[in-house]
């Protein structure tokens, strides 16, 4: 009876859920896709038909794509995630009807809390020259997108900048008399550059560790003059604690939105790959069910789900790195169950109107399987051609 009451409660609030879902981005960072294609990898829909990546994301019900930008990766990594590559992928995303998020790393390679390496071309710059370089690089890439008719909805200035960006000039040094000064100045240079090209784009400041409270960071950043329109978080649940991780993340999203009154977006998430990814589906369904009802949550992006068969960049051989282990495609290059919860635009692999035409009150999961409405677990379901969220 409790489960039935829960279901009825969500039917009663379905209109507000549908409204909030319209502002909730469901997407993926597929920055590796062109590099994978160049290495001979292809992508397929659930029927095994080879499908262009951005079109495939749209078919899966996703609404957005995230793309990283490196300054001059050709110096070591290769011609991927530079301006030309990003513009090419963004045009494909636009043609597929997807919104675009651009993620500036301000580095020639990955930037994260353990590595915010200054681009080689900027190494001898004074601080004023560095601020100008941030401005020029940001404007250059965004203007190239604008020239091709692509208007990003969001732009990140820096990637996982918990300890600042573009070290050492923009590093947050706690024993310094002004620990935030360099980072805030460089971040604001990026912010202002974004607004000069796309005034309506939401500028994101991005941190890792979504399950941990991050209010202190954004409060100090703001108190020191930092500017942002949205908050981005990375969230990679662990196998033994994923439910607790999801609960804490949802709580923090709500708290951050209430405190700063800006959208909070999970710009990166993922879960460990296995042969069928049914556990990943459970984890992601739980994450969606906890966050979609938070009015201030702006969406969820899966990080590099297209990786399969342990593909990895050629450059990883030089570093001794293993392949990414959180891809969400099966070994045959088809989307796995892990991506079913991202299908907020409609159930994956089925026609919702067709499914419910005979029995409008029949309930289905996101894989199109009939389920007993009295035995629903936490998750997202389809009933009467509408979505039902069960907490």
Image (tube, grey):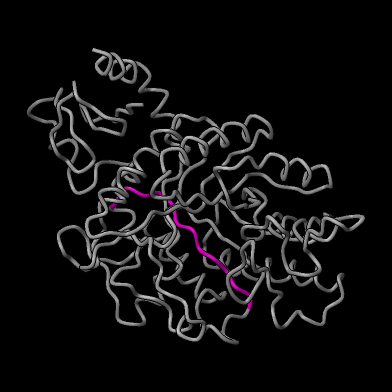
Magenta stretch bounds: 60-71
- Give the quadrant of the C terminus: top left
Task: Tell me the residue at 53%/51% (across/down).
Answer: 234
Residue 204 in percent (x, y) is at 63, 50
- How many marks the image carries: the answer is 0
Task: Tell me the residue at 38%/19% (across/down).
Answer: 13
From the viewer's perspective, is residue 33 above or below residue 290? below
Most distant residue in the front direction: 240
Is residue 356 found left or right of 347 in the rendered image? left
Is residue 109 found left or right of 368 in the rendered image? right
Task: Tell me the residue at 68%/66% (across/down).
Answer: 138
Q: For residue 318: magenta? A: no
Residue 320 in percent (x, y) is at 48, 81
Residue 368 in percent (x, y) is at 16, 40
From the viewer's perspective, is residue 149 above or below residue 339? below
Q: For residue 70: magenta? A: yes
- Give the quadrant of the N terminus: top left
In depth, the one of 116 and 105 nearer the eye is: 116
Is residue 300 found left or right of 263 in the rendered image? left
Q: Quadrant of residue 55?
A: bottom left
Residue 193 in percent (x, y) is at 73, 60
Q: In which quarter of the image is residue 139?
A: bottom right
Task: Tell me the residue at 43%/84% (across/down).
Answer: 314
Most distant residue in the right direction: 177
From the viewer's perspective, is residue 336 above or below residue 342? below
Q: Quadrant of residue 272?
A: bottom left
């Amino acid at each position: 009876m409790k489960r039935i009451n829960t279901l009825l409660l969500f039917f009663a609030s379905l209109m507000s859920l549908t409204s909030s879902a319209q502002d909730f981005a469901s997407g993926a960072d597929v920055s590796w896709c062109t590099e994978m294609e160049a290495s001979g990898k292809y992508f397929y829909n659930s029927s095994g038909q080879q499908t262009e990546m951005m079109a495939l994301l749209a078919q899966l019900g996703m609404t957005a794509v995230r793309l990283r930008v490196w300054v001059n990766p050709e110096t070591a990594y290769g011609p991927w995630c530079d301006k030309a590559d990003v513009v090419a992928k963004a045009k494909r995303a636009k043609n597929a009807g997807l919104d675009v998020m651009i993620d500036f790393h301000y580095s020639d390679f990955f930037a994260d809390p353990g590595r915010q390496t200054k681009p080689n071309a900027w190494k001898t710059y004074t601080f004023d020259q560095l601020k100008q370089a941030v401005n020029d690089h940001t404007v250059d890439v965004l203007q190239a997108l604008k020239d091709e008719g692509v208007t990003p909805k969001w732009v990140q200035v820096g990637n996982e900048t918990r300890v600042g960006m573009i070290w050492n000039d923009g590093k947050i040094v706690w024993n310094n008399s002004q620990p935030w000064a360099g980072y805030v100045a460089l971040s604001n240079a990026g912010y202002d550059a974004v607004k000069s090209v796309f005034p309506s784009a939401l500028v994101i400041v991005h941190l890792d560790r979504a399950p941990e409270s991050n209010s202190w960071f954004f409060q100090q950043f703001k108190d020191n003059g930092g500017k942002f329109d949205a908050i981005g978080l990375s969230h990679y649940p662990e196998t033994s604690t994923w439910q607790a991780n999801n609960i804490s993340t949802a709580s923090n999203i709500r708290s951050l939105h209430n405190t700063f009154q800006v959208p909070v977006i999970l710009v990166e998430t993922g879960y460990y790959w296995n042969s069928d990814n049914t556990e990943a589906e459970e984890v992601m369904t739980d994450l969606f069910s906890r966050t979609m009802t938070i009015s201030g949550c702006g969406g969820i992006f899966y990080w590099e789900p297209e990786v399969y068969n342990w593909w990895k960049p050629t450059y990883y051989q030089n570093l001794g790195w293993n392949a990414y282990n959180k891809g969400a495609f099966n070994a045959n290059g088809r989307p796995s169950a892990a991506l079913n919860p991202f299908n907020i635009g409609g159930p994956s692999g089925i026609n919702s109107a067709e499914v419910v035409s005979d029995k409008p009150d029949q309930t289905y999961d996101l894989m199109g399987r009939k389920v007993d409405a009295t035995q629903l677990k936490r998750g997202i379901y389809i009933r009467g051609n509408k979505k039902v969220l069960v907490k």
